[in-house]
Amino acid sequence: MTGARGPGADPESLLQAAAQGDRLALARLVSMVERGGDPAREVGRLAFPRGGRAYTVGITGAPGAGKSTLTSQLIGHLRSGGIQVGVLAVDPTSPFSGGALLGDRVRMQDHALDPGVFIRSMATRGHLGGLALAVPEAIRVLDAAGLDTVLVETVGVGQVEVEVAGAADTTVVVVTPGSGDSIQANKAGLLEMADVFVINKADRPGTRDLRRDLKLMLQMSPPREWQPPIVEAVATTGQGIEDVWGAVVSHRAFLEEDGRVTRLRQAHLEEELRRIVARRLEEQARRALSDPDLDEVREDLAQRRMDPYQAAERVLEHMVG
């Protein structure tokens, strides 16, 4: 295992070390990406051309669905086949430190010492329910480091969970019987985004009803080239894990036909570009709104001499100028 050069190691050296198996260097690269700024952009610039090989699986669903246990079982299944695995667990942001509240080793400690596994908790940075803007970049860093498969487990807090599909090749939606998850999946838009449905805790009553509801909703949805399979599992015992991964493998084979995976990843990159541009514009607008030159606009808005749309036009004119 190669050692990084110390706290001041540059991104190029860290990336080379990470590609040779240095997990500390890889962790430091992900930290750079999380912090943002110029170092993060340099990491992204270096990692981008070295990626494109790892297969990414998003795992999402409501809180309490057993996503972390399922992810842990999938890690074990993949490692039994010699596959190197990276895991990004996107957790709620701590209101005190800004970091991830839930530690990776707390939930997946069985794999923490496996050199073929890299697990990292990432904070959503206040980006409610979905992926942090840093996560797609972190995926590329893991890819550039030579990991074969990247699992991205997201927080489950509502409709914005669908953002996981913006960074994953295959999106797995985890639901549980007796919790109304089928209704929530429909409301949140997860029905359209799911490539695989997993009914976890399938040893509980209501599994048959949940399967029926999911099938009915899929039948009522607009036609798709890929019909998401519904797989039953009990993650706490490992039951059904091979079937879950088999469904992912089947979807991957479907995507690799006729270049579908290339088109999907291009669409994901374009969506990421849109989000980056939107965030940059938001930052510029925030700076512009604090400019003394716009004091008159703020005053006119406060006195209702100008409506918010007119004020926005003035702000945009100021930004362009």
Image (cartoon, helix red, strand yellow):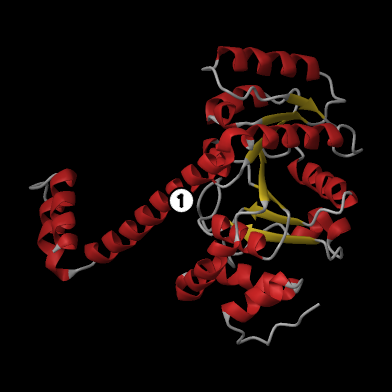
Q: Closer to the camera, 136 or 285?
A: 136
Q: Residue at x 53, y 40 (%)?
A: 264
Residue 306 visible in image? yes
Q: Is residue 142 above or below residue 177?
A: below
Q: Quadrant of residue 317?
A: bottom left
Side of 161 relative to 59 (left or right):
left
Q: Vertically, is 56 above or below 252?
A: below
Residue 83 at x, y percent in the picture = 81, 53
- Residue 308: give x, y in percent of width and height: 18, 46
Q: Please name the residue shown 60% across and 27% down the image.
A: 185
| Quarter of the figure with residue 47 | bottom right
> What SS does tag 1 mark?
helix
Q: Is residue 173 visible?
A: no
Q: Where residue 135 appears, x then y in whole percent? A: 57, 56
Quadrant where the C terminus is found in the figure: bottom left
- Amino acid residing under circle 1: Glu
> From the image, which quarter does the N terminus lie in?
bottom right
Number of residue marks: 1
**Going 54% across and 17% down the picture, which residue do you hit?**
223
Would you call the spot at circle 1 few (<14 residues within 10 Å), some (14-19), or many (20 or more)? some
What residue is rendered at 70% in x and 72% in y?
Answer: 18
276 relative position to 215: left or right: left
Quarter of image, res 26 = bottom right
**On the image, numbered disc 1 is attached to which residue?**
272
| Extreme residue toward the front, this view | 258
Q: How far across and how far down the image is residue 64, in percent? A: 73, 38
